[in-house]
Amino acid sequence: MGAYSKCGVDGYTEEKVGKVKEEEPVKRVGKRKKQKARKGISIDKSPQGDSETDKEESVEAMNPTPLDTKSNIVANWKIFQQGERSIYQIIRANGADTVYMSFGAMLKDFTREDLIELYRLVMQKYGTNRPEDAYDRVLWSDLRTMFDPPLNEDAIWSLPLQQKMISWRYYDKCAVHCLTLEACNIYMLADRKYPLSKDACQVMLKMKLLDGKMNEVCYKLLKMIEKQAGVKK
């Protein structure tokens, strides 16, 4: 099996953009009115109610219960430019938002469920229609490469042999791996096979998988790439 190493280096030059750091997503939550969570939907408190209801609400205020899981679901996204970088803003259903300095930084924080929901939202808005906005177009393309059925004739799969490979990185929380080339990144789900060439897979194994942790998903990914590279054990 190809060796892999644990590494904390991103492979990108760290730049300051305002007070936001790439490794430290900024979470912002606006002012909230007193609300009750019910089936993941925030409902404003009714001004009318009997004393028993008031007592129940007082108890809830003293002993808050966690928000329903649906309240933390990805509800929207925004991409804007600051300097020469694309900034990703992810808005949750509960009103919280997080700002990421890159797509890779977002993947470090995302679960697979987060990623699936973002894909669903982007496809719901654009479908197979190529977005006119350049920043949304990059996100749309990255997500389609990951989730749509891969086709051998897609031009992206010839790029690893046309451009110098910089790094191969694994994002454990969402089980995604990324092949960084000179001019672009190719993001792939760790549990899906893509039409990478035998030569490309051989180079990937020589580069080693950064941040690869010994778990079942990562192990199967390495075995799959070894098989595509023609490595015999």
Image: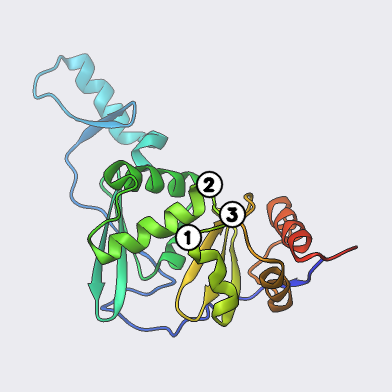
Q: Position of residue 53 (x, y in %)?
A: 22, 18
The residue identified by callout 1 is 107
Residue at 54% across / 53% down in the picture?
151
Please tell me whether residue 11 is drawn above or below residue 129 in the rendered image. Answer: below
Classify mark 2: residues with Cα within 10 Å, few (<14), some (14-19) or many (20+).
few
User: Left of 133 or right of it: where is 113?
Assistant: right
Is residue 179 shown to the viewer in this render?
Answer: no
Dot 1 lies on which element? helix
Residue type indicated by callout 3: Ala
Cα–Cα gap, marks 1 and 2: 21 Å
The residue identified by callout 2 is 149
Checking the image for residue 175, the label placed there is: 3
Locate residue 214: give its quadrant.
bottom right
Residue type indicated by callout 2: Pro
Classify mark 1: residues with Cα within 10 Å, few (<14), some (14-19) or many (20+).
many
Viewer-nearest of labels 1 and 2?
Answer: 2
Residue at 25% across / 53% down in the picture?
29
Q: Residue furthest left?
A: 47
